[in-house]
Structures are given as C-alpha cells and as structure tokens.
Amino acid sequence: MLNGVDDLMKLNIALIAHDKKKDEMVKMSIAYKEILKDHTLYATGTTGGRIVEATGLSVHRFKSGPLGGDQQIGAYVSDNKIDMIIFLRDPLTSQPHEPDISALLRLSDVYEIPLATNLGTAEMLLLGLDAGFLDWRPIAKKREIDPAADPLDDN
Ligand SMILES: O=C(CO)COP(=O)(O)O
C-alpha cells in the first residue's frame, strides 16, 4: 500500500546470490547500506539471512532459491511488486534449480525490471538508484494502481 511521497519513492529491491557469490553480496550490502536502507528489501532465504546478519538491515525473506525462492520473487515481478533485482549469479557452478533461475530472468525482461547479474552492474544500478535514475519506477507503479494519476495519460 502506498502512503504519501516517502512510500511512493521507496523501491522494492530483490537481492539474490548463489553460494559462491554470497560473500560478495554481503560486502556489497555493507558498502551500499546507506542506499539500501531507504528501500524495501526482499531476498531469497539464505542470502537474506546473510545480509541481515552482516548489516542489520530489514529484509523480507522468501524461501531458499532451490526450494522455490526464485519463483516467489518471479511471482512478485509479475505482480509489478519488484522494482530492481541484484542477482549475483555463479556462472561456473551448475544449479539444480536452473529452470527457476531462467524463469526469473525471463520475467524480469518481460516486465523490464532493472536487473544486475554481477557486481559491476550491481554497483552501477545502486549508484543510479541513488542518483534518481529509477524515479520512473514509482510512476509506473502508480499507473498500475491508479490510471487517473498517470501524468502521461491524455484521457
Ligand atoms: O539459489 C539461489 C538463487 O538461485 C539463492 O538462494 P539462497 O539465497 O537461499 O541461497
């Protein structure tokens, strides 16, 4: 539910990391805590636990990835509830739940959700978020909730 300007500008960010990338995710969360703290954070189970433990940030945790967490985040994407995804994937280890991972990436493209799959891009997204480059997302969200409030709507 959106309440006022502050909530409207708060984005929903999903954070996911494969096992060999979890340390990287933790370091990134610590480094960008000041940016992340102003938004609503979601994560797959184990990744979320590591972030909470390392930063004290509040994180809504879904199931672990192999147990359906990627799919749960995908469902949120299809409901327009996720504005940005940082998914630090391990490109060198095969994952038992690869179809779930592909499905999440596919849905992110379907809904044009900004998605980083490595640390380099993740940092660009976080800095872009801080600079206001994602300010269009709340407008898109608002359009979904209240078409009459859409500033681009001529009707
Ligand atoms: O497997 C994952 C993403 O595909 C991540 O899940 P966990 O955060 O539960 O380890």
Image (tube, rainbow, N blue to C red):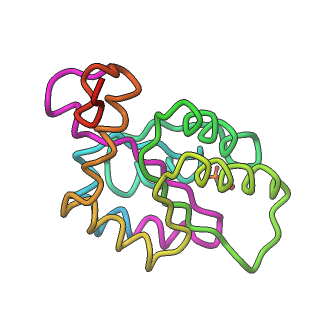
Residue at x 29%, y 48% (from the top left corner): 136
Residue that lies at the very extreme toward the left in this rendered image: 5
- 146 is higher (above) or lower (below) than 14: above
Q: Position of residue 121 (x, y in %)?
A: 44, 74
- 87 is higher (above) or lower (below) than 46: below
Q: Position of residue 69 (x, y in %)?
A: 66, 42
**Residue 68 sits in quarter:** top right
In front: 19, or 36? Answer: 36
In front: 79, or 140? Answer: 140
**Quarter holding the C terminus?**
top left
Position of 2 with respect to 24 (left or right) is left
Decide whether residue 67 is among the magenta residues.
no
Residue at x 22%, y 31% (from the top left corner): 7
Q: Position of residue 38 (x, y in %)?
A: 22, 46
Residue at x 81%, y 58% (from the top left corner): 98
**Quarter holding the N terminus?**
top left
- 112 is higher (above) or lower (below) than 118: above
Residue at x 36%, y 62% (from the top left corner): 29
Task: Report the span colored magenta.
Answer: 1-27
Q: Position of residue 126 (x, y in %)?
A: 32, 64
In front: 150, or 84? Answer: 150
